[in-house]
Image: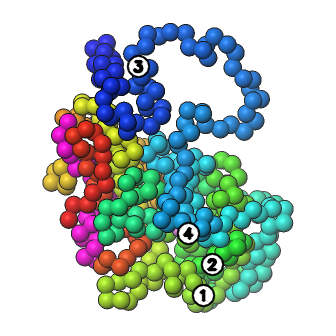
Amino acid sequence: MRENRRRFLHSAAALTGGTLLAGLTGSQARAAQGADLPLGVPPWTKQLGPGVDAAPYGAPSRYERDVIRRNVPFLTATTESSVSFTPLQDLDGVITPNGLCFVRDHGGTAMVDPVQHRLMIHGMVDRPMVYTMADLMRFPSESHVYFLECAANGGMDWRGAQMQGVQFSHGMVHCCEWTGVKLSTLMNEAGVSSKARWLLAEGADAAAMTRSIPIEKAAGDVLVAWSQNGERLRPENGYPLRLIVPGWQGNVNIKWLRRLKFGQEPWETREETSKYTELMADGKALQFSWAMQAKSVITRPCPEKPILGRGFCEVSGLAWSGMGKIARVDVSFDGGANWKTAALQEPVLPKSLTRFRIPWEWNGEVAYLQSRAMDETGYVQPTIVALRNAWGSNAIYHKNSIHTWRVNQNGTIDNVQID
Ligand SMILES: Nc1nc2c(c(=O)[nH]1)N[C@H]1C(S)=C(S)[C@@H](COP(=O)(O)O)O[C@H]1N2
Ligand SMILES: [Mo]
């Protein structure tokens, strides 16, 4: 134990004079610099701290101010129609804290007064309904952990490695415990006609986002949710009410939900015709590719979290599948020639982020780190070559290929593609 600690201190101290420090974030640099101090009496031990009422609603430590959502300037013509990404490199476990969940808005964040908000259910139903939030929250509720991923997550890397950092290459995903009423409960209450085949869901934002959802999914695991990780939804994630369509592309998870209409045909809205379709190599577009296929990425190390020294390095990341549970994640250190099976953090939940971890000894050589997820249906995350062969390179959405991080000799990490 003592030996190990000494060795750690030695290598950490060596780093402070080395080139790697430049790549460290504020808190890492402070840890490295402080590592050679004896255990002194720090200022915060010599005086009382603020009282328990200093922060009626708590916020992260001021030393964590680098842990934030970020957007990409070239994807942001206006911030009202853009996306800010989850900082996956800074997160542990599988739950995304509410303030760090990626946000994808098409018409800005609607600032909805929950007292004035209504949900209308109409169309092919026996009893059209208009609910207040108070009405909805009287229904029996359920809580489930689900990931939510934008179909465009990773889309910028279709044609080549472009995004320097896991926040931007994979950060259009979050995973929360959602609480609400099952949509099937509301469907029974309204008496949906047996002839209804489709559902239209509409948001109350300036984009009035609308999507068609087939009745089988609507009657399945879809939630009409008002809470996220134990507290009411954040405005930017749909307060006071949103649809959670487990495992399906983010776009159908309508935020600020205000209307559900039942009918016989899809409505062919803008978001399912001109957007959120896949343009294939032959120029035809695939419509209604809803489920997010199995995917994974190593979140540490990564470009934002370089390796600080030779020796032990825990490799950790996230895997998920819109088709069910993650069955296995394999990790390669040599660009896919050899694979080792990683440990999965329990409990492994369906349609949820799953954390994997694998120990590694880094010998200071260049390495190509990859992870490959398999889900309970037997589906295996494809290589970029296989994905391009299947989808062509016009595609934007559903890029779920195996991702490669190149570890350089100085411990820094780059996004690369192996063809
Ligand atoms: N009403 C409405 N719902 C919406 C959107 C929107 O702009 N308006 N964006 C959609 C898209 S494209 C995605 S990826 C998810 C993002 O959810 P989040 O902002 O909570 O991460 O919300 C979806 N629901
Ligand atoms: Mo999206």
How would you rate the neighbour count of disc 2 (Cα within 10 Å): few for under 14, some for 14-19, many for 20 or more? many
Q: Is 319 located above or below residue 42 in the figure? A: below
Q: Earlier in the sequence, mark 4 or mark 2?
A: 4
How would you rate the neighbour count of disc 4 (Cα within 10 Å): few for under 14, some for 14-19, many for 20 or more? few
Regarding residue 266, the answer to whether it shows in the image is: no
Whole-number angstrom distance, CA of label 1 to CA of label 3: 61 Å
Range drawn in magenta:
364-391
Q: Is 193 located above or below residue 140 in the figure? A: below
Label 3 sits on what residue type?
Ala
Label 4 sits on what residue type?
Ala
Is the CB–ligand 1 distance for label 1 below 8 Å? no
Q: Which residue is mark 2?
A: 210
Q: Earlier in the sequence, mark 1 or mark 3?
A: 3
Q: Earlier in the sequence, mark 3 or mark 2?
A: 3
Do the numbered discs 4 and 2 sit on residues whose CB atoms are within 8 Å?
no
Q: Which residue is mark 1?
A: 267
Do the numbered discs 2 and 1 sit on residues whose CB atoms are within 8 Å?
yes
Label 2 sits on what residue type?
Thr
Whole-number angstrom distance, CA of label 1 to CA of label 4: 28 Å
Number of the label disc, if any, that sits on residue 35: 3
Whole-number angstrom distance, CA of label 3 to CA of label 4: 44 Å
Q: Is 280 located above or below residue 318 in the figure? A: below
Label 1 sits on what residue type?
Trp
